[in-house]
Image (cartoon, coloured by chain):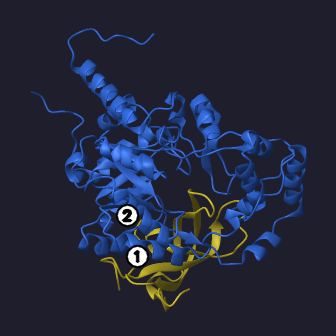
Amino acid sequence: MTDRHPVRAGFERAVAGKVAECDGGDAVPGTNLGGRQEFTGTLTGDYVDHGDPPWRWYLMRDLTRKPDGYAHEEVWCESDALYLADGSAPPAPHSKRAP
Amino acid sequence: MSRDPLHTKLCDSLGIEFPIVAFTHCKDVAVAVINAGAFAVYGAAPHSPDEIAADIKWIRERIGGKPFGMDLLLPAAAPPGGTIDELRAQIPKTHVDFVDDMKKRYDIPPPKGRVEHFELGWVAQDRARAQLDVVLEERVPVLAFGLGSPAFLIEAAHERGIQVWGLVGKPRQAKRELEAGVDAIIAQGSDAAGHTGSIGTFSIVPAVAAIAGDKVPVIAAGGITTGQHLAAALCLGAAGVWTGTVWLPSRESDVDIILKEKLIAATAEDTVHSKCMSGFSMRILKCKWTEEWERPDAPPTLPAPYQLLLGGELHQAVKDYRIEPFMTDAAGQGVGFVTSMKPAREIVFDMVDEAREVFENLTSDEPVATPG
């Protein structure tokens, strides 16, 4: 991470232990394409706010759904890519649902 | 005189003549489309922040104050990090052997130089933020996002007079984008090129249109290459169409001529939804690489980023030496209607004429001629 885009870590008690789905994905390096990857798991409550305006990412573990062959046991998910059981998104600084 | 069905709220919102949005990675195509009265969104995701600044300047100098857009890909999920060497070391030997055997059988040499797939931005958030800084500073009229949610930057964009568009493949994503305050929603069906969701264009567009209501325009995407598609999209509730494949073999496009010829010859059945390129599922033109991964004895594809790293050297060599059987590109199912290499301006006008003819036939008292 660069000084220009500082990362601030935090913990959001309200979502810790909650199951969520993530409509994730990323740009495909070396191409002009992007691809989605979907996950289901449990939010730990840990988050990072990246840069300004803050861009919030939550840590998801105990993955019960992940892409075939996904080698990791955890994934960082952008807050607006996350869907809690009631369809809502977890809190984020840019939204009305901010704590 | 009745209202022009091709003059939609997207036209009003952008000050354009035709509700056609070209998504392109070629600046010449973007300029030609804009100057023909439609709209273009330039795919800037693979470019560095400095390159994006130069691209914006280049486009602005050629369109006389008309609006244009830039498209970036924001990450929405990020696995724990690792260096390229660490990640490559985790690729199973069976997969390495499978690709080595392919290289021998097809006599594919090592790449000439650096492998692009091994060098581009793996620290996803930092790269995307640096790109965003440029487009916000340059006050590009429209910022479109083909992936990930732009919610966190909508306020910053709107403060600068920038419209923000989000692309969705599911109704729940459309609801989320609408809540965030986007200015238009691109509803993309599985007919589209590259990565798509599983819902077809004819189902996702009206579903998203119902969610958007009168709040924001919906732009239909996925398999749209003709005026008939444009007319159908408007009937489904869209205010415009997002098009990509149709521009790839256009006269101005910088796509390799070999690929242009393959695209022109291709039908919808010549595209395949496959994970073999990157580990992400995406619709691409069939080629030897996709065929090899469909062999019964082929190993299962690896997840991203391993599949891309596995094939990186081969793909670079294919590009360096223009090895036709392995050359491919993302292409939507509408590719079957793209049958000649036309100037971008002509493509715009043909789509408009075809759509007008559809609407005239629909409202005419005369019997409608049937094809053939």
The chain assigned the colour yellow in the figure is: A
The amino acid sitting under disc 2 is Lys
What number is the disc on residue B57? 2
- Determine if residue B207 is in view: no
Foreground: A98 or B143?
A: B143
Q: What colour is chain B?
A: blue
> Is residue B2 found left or right of B266 in the rendered image?
left
The amino acid sitting under disc 1 is Asp
Q: Residues within 10 Å of mark 1 (few under 14, many from 20)?
A: few
Query: Could you tell me which secondary element the residue under label 1 belongs to?
Result: helix
* Mark 2–mark 1 distance (CA, rounded to whole Å): 15 Å
**Residue picked out by circle 1:** B133
User: Subunit of mark 2?
Assistant: B
> Is residue A45 found left or right of B234 in the rendered image?
right
Q: Are marks 2 and 1 on the same chain?
A: yes
Query: Could you tell me which secondary element the residue under label 2 belongs to?
Result: helix
